[in-house]
Image: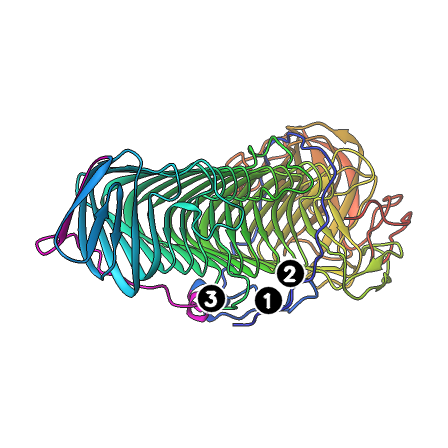
Amino acid sequence: MSRGTVRPLRHRAAAALVSAALVSAALAGCSSEGTSDAADSGSGASGSASAGADVDGTQTAAAVLAADRQAHDADTGEDVSAAVRITLDGDAASVDGAGAEADGSTVTVTKGGTYRLSGTLSDGRIVVDAPDATVKLVLDGVRISSSTGAAIAATAAGGLVVVLADGSANTLSDAGSYAADAEVNAALFSAGDLTVAGTGSLTVRGNGDDGIASKDGLVIAAATVTVQAADDGVRGKDYLVVRDGELTVTAGGDGLKADNEEDADAGYVSVAGGTVDVTAEGDGVDAATDLVVTGGRLTVGSGGGSGNRPAEDASAKGLKAGVISVLAGGTIAVDASDDAVHSDGAVHFAGATVSVASGDDGVHAEGDLVVDKGTLKVTSAVEGLEGFDIAVRGGSVSLVSSDDGINASGNSGSSQQGGGGPGGGGGGENVGAYKLTVSGGTLLVDSEGDGLDSNGTAEITGGTVVVNGPQRGGNGALDVNGTFTIGAGTLLASGSSGMVVAPDEDSAQGWLSATLDSSVPAGTTLHVVDAAGKVVATYVTSKQIQNVVYSSSAIKSGQEYRIYSGGTSSGGDGTGGLAVEAGALGTAQRIATATAGEAPEGGGFGGGGGGGPGGGPGGDRG
């Protein structure tokens, strides 16, 4: 697996979050959703090793996990027939068997084996000092609180396995503070690998610092675990793996965390199953390297949610990875004051059902941002998707943003002056190495800034793209600094007429750009009609617009098309879905005429590749 040097390209959007209406569009004569098998092979068009981060964004979950350190397995059976019994009794404890000893309210385990604990310690602790050995603690109705440190601390052990006995309820709580350099700083702590499993329940209160922590790997195999922590909720150094069970975390710092930044095959978080609910003041899930979700249900709230803005020196992202995030399965919901999904390298949507709301970017990748499969819904964000190299190759994406909907951009990369001829992007803007490509799937954008914005190039070769762009001038439904071509698929982009950009005139597929005689309000049915009077597309506006750009296999370059307002629309689901068949003109009135392949007269400002008639310098960037 390629591990690249990550360059700090982050820039923050300054625009305030503004509510936007959901997309409402109906199209006729549109191509079917594209599919991609490239994701399964771990290679594809987006693996560009962009200047943002040298990480292949098309990697599958299996490939990423295979390159990471293998998570440990442990015997989590609860057979206690040969277990040493430890009875807790208020301010004292007793041991029935060898391998452990009690000294007042402190129990020390010195040998590997299985130990069954029951009862209460009002101010005591369990210490495991068994170097290189595996110790299994079966908690069967245990309540341990400590005023001096951890409730359970494996200070020396090859592995600690905590099994929650069937039907039992267990509680651990620790001291209210720790020294700044304390080695043990969690209510449940292990210096070796830590496993939590069983069919009982465990409540952990990390009063002084973390809730559950391991200096090696940490696996939640199956259990019902509730954690409240002053700082991080559940932290594994080398990895944190959730395989099953129910995990609920409330944290003053990060919720779930793996923080090994030294080893390329460590520092990862994997959620493969179970139900995980995280509320964190800091990052919801923070992986130093990789974040992989292949199953289960993951719900994350960070920084108080999307209605808040984090402090300048704080990180309150929903899902954060240092190298790559692969969201391949399960159901994920994120409400974050900072980026909802963030990677210093790449993000790959590979099959999960994802819904996010953000006070900043819905999804942000310093390098590749790839959508192959599954569903991604950004319900609110300043910018919807932002990355160096953005590729939508399949699946379903819908987003609402108060600024740009999709933004291929960054702070580095080669640049050149835009060129090109009429009908392209326009106007001498610098062209970076950034790229936006759509080759399959469905992409629905509702933005108050630019709808599709690339500070480099853009290309559509398949799929369906519907953009409900800005109502104000200075932004456009489309904004591309460099070349912008369309070879197949369906594109319908509508918005203001202040900065109109259309595909390049040498695109393989025909397109038209029509500036309407006057603005039309939301809820208006528009028809695209060819010279023979045939309706080739029908669209219902979701906001006020004055320009429409449309491309499909039905549009032939050089031919004249007319835009009509009124009549009826048939088909579509009212939320940006495709019409099954075209609408009817009825008493509709003609409001614009356009020749396919030609930019409209006085079409406003272009984006990069070359201005059309009346074009000029590009508008706002970023």
Q: Nearer the viewer, residue 265 or 67?
A: 265
Q: Is residue 571 visible?
A: no
Query: In the image, what residue type sits under mark 1?
Result: Val
Label 2 and label 3: CA atoms lie apart by: 16 Å
Q: Nearer the viewer, residue 112 or 549?
A: 112
Give the mark count.
Answer: 3
Could you say which disc has been placed on residue 64 in the image? 3
* 512 with respect to 554 (left or right): right
- Point out residue 19 in the picture as x, y percentages from the top left corner: 64, 29
Where does label 2 land, which residue? 367
Q: Is residue 171 above or below residue 410?
A: above
Please give the range of residues in magenta.
Answer: 62-90
Could you say which disc has been placed on residue 55 in the image? 1
Under circle 1, the secondary element is loop
Query: In the image, what residue type sits under mark 3?
Result: Val
Label 1 and label 2: CA atoms lie apart by: 7 Å
**Mark 1 Cα-neighbour bin, 10 Å: few <14, some 14–19, many ≥20:** many
Q: Earlier in the sequence, mark 1 or mark 3?
A: 1
Query: In the image, what residue type sits under mark 2?
Result: Gly
- Residue 164 in the magenta stretch? The answer is no
Q: Nearer the viewer, residue 436 or 88?
A: 88
View extreme (front): residue: 103
- Point out residue 140 in the picture as x, y percentages from the top left corner: 18, 42
Q: Earlier in the sequence, mark 1 or mark 2?
A: 1
The quadrant where residue 169 appears: top left
- Point out residue 176 in the picture as x, y percentages from the top left corner: 44, 35
